[in-house]
Image (cartoon, coloured by chain):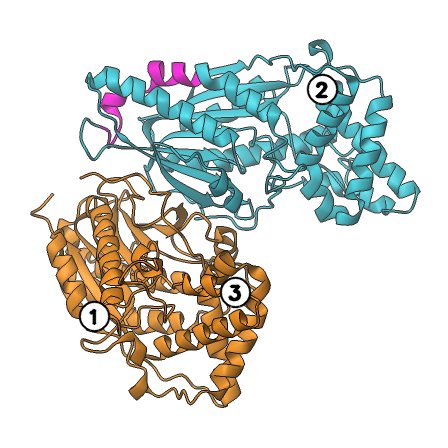
Chain colours: A cyan, B orange
C-alpha cells in the first residue's frame, strides 16, 4: 500500500479560527446538532459492533490504551463532545465485557489541516477530560498515523469537502465549465461528473490511508452531508443559499469590486453524495464493511423571528465560506459580501421547513475487515 | 503510582511565539548550539544503550513503531533537529540489528504547555519529514502519555524552568525573601534552599510522570542548564545578565514606571542544578539508571563586534523573559526595559569568554529500569 506520510499538496480551507463573533467555534451550531444526534448511534455502534475481546492490543491490563482519532476536528467544542461520547460508550462496553470498574486509558488524536487553529482547540479543551490529548496536523487524504494504531476513528461534517476544486469546472474550455454557479447544483451532467469523480478519488485516498492505520475489527464513523437519491443540490437549502451568495458575487462584479472572471473561476469544493454512491465507493475500496448507513434525523431549530434566521444563516454560510472567499477575492470584500447576502436572503422567499431542505446528514458505520491486508 | 492526567494548575511561561524579530524561533541560537552539540551523544546513546531486541513492541515487522517525545519543544526549529537526530540514530541501529534496509515507522510527539504557539510549530515543520507528527499540550510535570507508550524521550533546555516561583522567595516575612535579586544567585542560603527544594519537587513529579510512560529499557535524554559544583549563579554570564535586568527594573521603579513592590515580588523561576544534585535526585527517584552525565562543550560564538554581542544578548534575554515580564508588569514596559538593558549591558565590563561564563549545559542519559514497576 503506497501512501505518503502526509500529502502537503492538498488544499485546505480552515474554518474561521479563534473565538470571535465570526469564528467557527461560535457558528457551528448545526454541526453541534449533528454531534448530539449521533450520540445514541455511536453508543449502539460500540455495544453491537466493537468486538473488544478480539481487538488488537486491547485486554484487561494496565497497558490497555484505546486510541481514538477525530479527523477534521476544527477548533472545538463539537469535537470534544463527539470524543466524549465515544469514550463513554467504550468504557461502558469495557466494564460489561470484563465485569470490572477500573478504566482503561484513552489516547485521543485531534486531526485537521496544519493551518487549523490548534491553539484555540487547546484553549477550549475540557479541563477535566479523561484522556491523553494529541493534535495531528495534516490532510486526512494522506497517512497520519502508524500502522494498526487506531481503534476508533470519527469524522464529522468534513468528508463532503473535496481536496480541491475539480479542474474542469473552472476551465472555460471544458464542457464541465461551471460558469453559471459556484457549487455542484446537479443541473449540468458534466459538472456533476467532474465533482463526483473528485469526490470518488478523495474518498478512495481517504480509505486507503485509513486501512493500514485502523486495527482489524476497528470501527470508523463517518458523518457527512449528503443528498437523498434523486434529489439535486439545487433543490436544497444549502444549494439555494450558495446561489444567493453567487448572486451577491455577481453584484460585486457589476459594481467593479471584483472581476467577473474571478467570480466565474470561483467554485466551492464540496460535494454531497447519495447513500448509494457512498456504499458503492466503500465496497469498491474493499477494506471496510458497511455496518450501518442511515440518515440522521434533523432536530428542528427554534428560530423565533425572521431576523434570527437571517443572522444565523448568514453567520453559518460565512463561517463555512470565509476563508475560501478571502483566498480567492481578498479579504476586503468579505464584510460587504455578507452584508449583501443577509439582505438578499431576507428578501428571498426562502422558507426553512423540513419539506424544502432535503439535504441530509449521512451517518455511516464502517468496520475494518480482518481478512484483507 | 498516582499521577494526574495533566496538572493544569502548573504555571507556564511560553517562549515568544510566531516568527517575528522578538520570537523564540528567531532567538534560540544558543539552544540550537546545544542541539547540534548533542547529535553525537544521542547517536552514541542509541548505539550503545538502546537494546532493540528487548524493547517492548519493537521487532522486525510492519507494525513496529518507535514513539519519540520531545518535552518542552517550544515552536521549533530546534525540536525538529533534535528529533531527526534521534530518528537517524535509531534507523542506523535498527538496520544494523536486523540487517535490513527497510525502515520502521516513527511517531513523534511534540509537547509543551497548552499556551505554546503550536500553530507556529506546525507551520515550521520540515515538509519532507519521515515521521508521523503529533503535538501534546500540557505540563510535563504531569502525565501526558499512556502507560508504556514511549521508547525515547528528549527534553532540551526546559527542565531548569521551575513549575512556579518558590513562595518563600517573594514573601517579605520569610527568611528566604529574595529582595535583593530576581534570580537564585546562590549567595543567600535560604533563597538557594527554597529554589533547590522547588527544583527537587519538580524533578520528582517529572520522573514519576515519565516512569509509567516509558517502556522498560527506553531511553531519556535530559539537557538542562546547570552549574559546576562549587560555582554560584552570580558568577555566571546568565546570572550577571539577569542582575543587569534587575538593575533596569529598579531604574523603572525609581522613575515611577513600575512599583518597587512589583520589582521586589518578581523572581525568574529557573534553577541551575549541579551534576551531583541531579544524580542524587534521579537515584532517590529510583525508576531510572543514570547511563551518562556530562557537560556539553560550548562552541565559541563568532560575534565580531560589541554591537553584535549587545543585540544578541538582549534578544536572547528578552526571548526568555518577555512573557514573564508582561505577566508581572504589563506589556507597556517591555520595549523600554530592554532598550535600557541593551545600554546597561553595553556599559558593563561584561566580557564573554569561556573563563567567566561557567554555567554549563548538562547532558544526562537515563534508562528506564526494567526490574521496578
Task: Give me the residue at 56% from left, 76% from top.
Answer: B339
Q: Quadrant of residue A1?
A: top left
Could you tell me how far apart the alpha carbons at marks 1 and 2 are, in whole angstroms? Answer: 72 Å
Foreground tag (1 vs 2):
1
Magenta span of residues = A41-58
Looking at the picture, does residue B281 appear above or below residue A175? below
Query: What element does badge 1 sit on?
Result: loop
Query: What element does badge 3 sit on?
Result: loop
Q: Is residue A188 visible?
A: no
In the image, is A264 to the left or to the right of B244? right
Q: Main secondary structure of the magenta part?
A: helix
Looking at the picture, does residue B44 appear above or below residue A310? below
Task: Give me the residue at 25% from left, 29% from top.
Answer: A104
Question: Dot 2 corresponds to which residue?
Answer: A232
Chain bearing mark 2:
A
In front of the other: A302 or A140: A302
Q: Quadrant of residue A213?
A: top left
Q: Is residue B262 visible?
A: yes
Residue B346 x, y percent position in the rendering: 50, 86
**Mark number, residue B23:** 3
In the image, is A176 to the left or to the right of B209? right
State the quadrant of the C terminus of chain B: top left
Question: Dot 1 corresponds to which residue?
Answer: B274
Residue furthest to the right in view is A255
Amino acid at each position: 500500500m503506497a501512501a505518503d506520510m502526509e500529502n502537503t499538496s492538498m488544499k485546505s480551507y480552515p474554518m474561521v479560527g479563534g473565538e470571535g463573533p465570526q469564528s467557527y467555534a461560535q457558528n457551528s451550531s448545526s454541526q453541534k446538532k449533528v454531534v448530539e444526534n449521533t450520540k445514541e448511534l455511536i453508543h449502539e455502534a460500540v455495544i453491537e459492533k466493537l468486538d473488544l475481546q478480539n481487538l488488537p492490543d486491547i485486554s484487561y491490563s494496565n497497558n490497555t490504551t484505546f486510541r481514538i482519532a477525530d479527523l477534521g476536528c476544527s477548533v472545538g467544542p463539537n469535537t470534544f463532545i463527539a470524543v466524549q461520547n465515544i469514550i463513554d460508550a467504550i468504557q461502558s462496553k469495557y466494564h460489561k465485557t470484563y465485569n470490572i470498574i477500573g478504566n482503561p486509558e484513552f489516547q485521543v488524536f485531534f486531526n485537521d489541516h496544519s493551518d487549523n487553529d490548534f491553539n484555540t482547540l487547546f484553549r477550549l479543551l475540557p479541563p477535566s477530560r479523561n484522556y491523553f490529548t494529541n493534535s495531528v496536523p495534516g490532510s486526512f487524504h494522506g497517512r497520519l498515523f502508524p500502522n494498526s494504531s487506531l481503534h476508533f476513528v470519527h469524522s464529522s461534517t468534513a468528508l463532503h469537502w473535496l481536496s480541491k476544486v475539480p479542474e474542469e469546472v473552472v476551465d472555460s474550455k471544458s464542457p464541465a465549465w461551471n460558469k453559471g454557479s459556484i457549487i455542484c447544483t446537479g443541473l449540468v451532467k458534466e459538472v456533476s461528473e467532474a465533482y463526483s469523480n473528485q469526490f470518488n478519488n478523495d474518498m478512495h485516498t481517504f480509505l486507503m490511508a485509513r486501512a493500514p492505520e485502523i486495527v482489524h475489527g476497528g470501527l470508523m464513523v463517518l458523518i457527512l452531508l449528503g443528498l437523498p437519491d434523486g434529489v439535486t443540490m439545487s433543490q436544497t437549502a444549502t444549494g439555494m443559499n450558495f446561489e444567493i451568495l453567487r448572486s451577491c458575487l455577481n453584484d460585486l462584479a457589476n459594481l467593479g469590486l471584483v472581476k467577473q472572471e474571478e467570480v466565474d473561476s470561483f467554485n466551492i469544493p464540496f460535494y454531497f453524495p447519495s447513500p448509494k454512491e457512498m456504499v458503492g465507493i466503500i465496497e469498491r475500496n474493499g477494506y471496510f464493511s458497511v455496518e450501518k448507513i442511515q440518515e440522521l434525523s434533523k432536530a428542528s431549530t427554534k428560530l423565533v423571528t425572521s431576523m434570527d434566521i437571517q443572522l444565523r444563516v448568514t453567520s453559518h454560510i460565512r463561517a463555512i465560506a470565509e476563508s475560501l472567499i478571502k483566498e480567492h477575492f481578498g479579504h476586503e470584500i468579505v464584510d460587504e459580501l455578507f452584508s449583501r447576502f443577509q439582505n438578499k436572503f431576507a428578501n428571498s422567499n426562502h422558507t426553512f421547513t423540513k419539506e424544502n431542505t432535503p439535504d441530509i446528514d449521512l451517518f455511516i458505520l464502517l468496520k475494518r475487515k480482518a481478512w484483507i491486508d
